[in-house]
Image (spheres, rainbow, N blue to C red):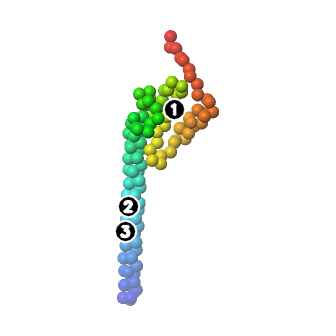
């Protein structure tokens, strides 16, 4: 093998190693980005859970907060008024209802909500 071929082989090997190292770094950065997105989503969820605890006392809440009862899941709570009962779901920013929350909303809209009294004795 002549010197030119040997030099070319070394250059190709060095470039290959550099390429592999850059790929490793790219995948490492992708992992970091995924981790940051996950942390951001987790913080957003925590913010939403904290916020929904205080929503009935916000200045733009249209009902008497003392008549609100927090449930937490699958909806945030129930507002009891003289002339109606309101199932409440609070959302912050761009968050969306879950499929279960949308289903509950459709049951209410279809009038498929009932009241039952169950006696144990």
Q: Position of residue 104 (x, y in %)?
A: 56, 35
Sequence-first tag of 2 and 3: 3
Which residue lies under the disc numbered 3?
21
| Residue at screen point 53% across, 38% down | 101
* 30 up-or-down from 16: above or below: above
Q: Residue 95, how many percent across, how many down?
A: 47, 46
Residue 7 occupies which quadrant of the picture?
Answer: bottom left
Q: Residue at x 38, y 88 (%)?
A: 4
Q: Earlier in the sequence, mark 1 or mark 2?
A: 2
Nearer the viewer's eye, disc 1 or disc 3?
1
Residue drawn at 38 percent across, 50 percent down: 39
Q: Secondary structure at mark 3?
A: helix
- Callout 2: SS: helix
Q: Quadrant of residue 14?
A: bottom left
Between residue 33 and residue 45, name the one nearer to us: 45
Residue 53 visible, this angle = no
Where residue 77 appears, as percent x and y from the top left, is 46, 32
Q: Which residue lies under the disc numbered 1? A: 87
Mark 1 element type: strand
Which one is earlier in the sequence, the residue at label 1 or at label 3? Answer: 3
**Mark 1 surroundings within 10 Å by alpha-carbon count, few (fewer than 14), some (14 through 19), many (20 or more):** some
Quarter placement of the N terminus: bottom left
Per the image, the residue denoted by label 2 is 28
Q: Residues within 10 Å of mark 3 (few under 14, many from 20)?
A: few
């Amino acid at each position: 093998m002549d010197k030119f071929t040997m030099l070319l082989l070394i250059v190709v090997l060095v470039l290959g190693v550099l390429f592999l190292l850059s790929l490793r770094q790219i995948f490492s950065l992708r992992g970091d980005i995924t981790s940051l997105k996950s942390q951001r989503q987790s913080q957003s969820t925590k913010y939403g859970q904290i916020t929904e605890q205080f929503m009935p006392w916000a200045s733009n809440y249209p009902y008497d907060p003392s008549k609100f009862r927090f449930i937490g899941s699958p909806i945030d709570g129930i507002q009891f008024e003289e002339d109606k009962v309101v199932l409440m779901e609070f959302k912050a920013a761009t968050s969306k209802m879950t499929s279960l929350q949308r289903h509950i909303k459709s049951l209410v809209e279809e009038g498929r909500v009932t009241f039952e009294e169950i006696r144990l004795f």
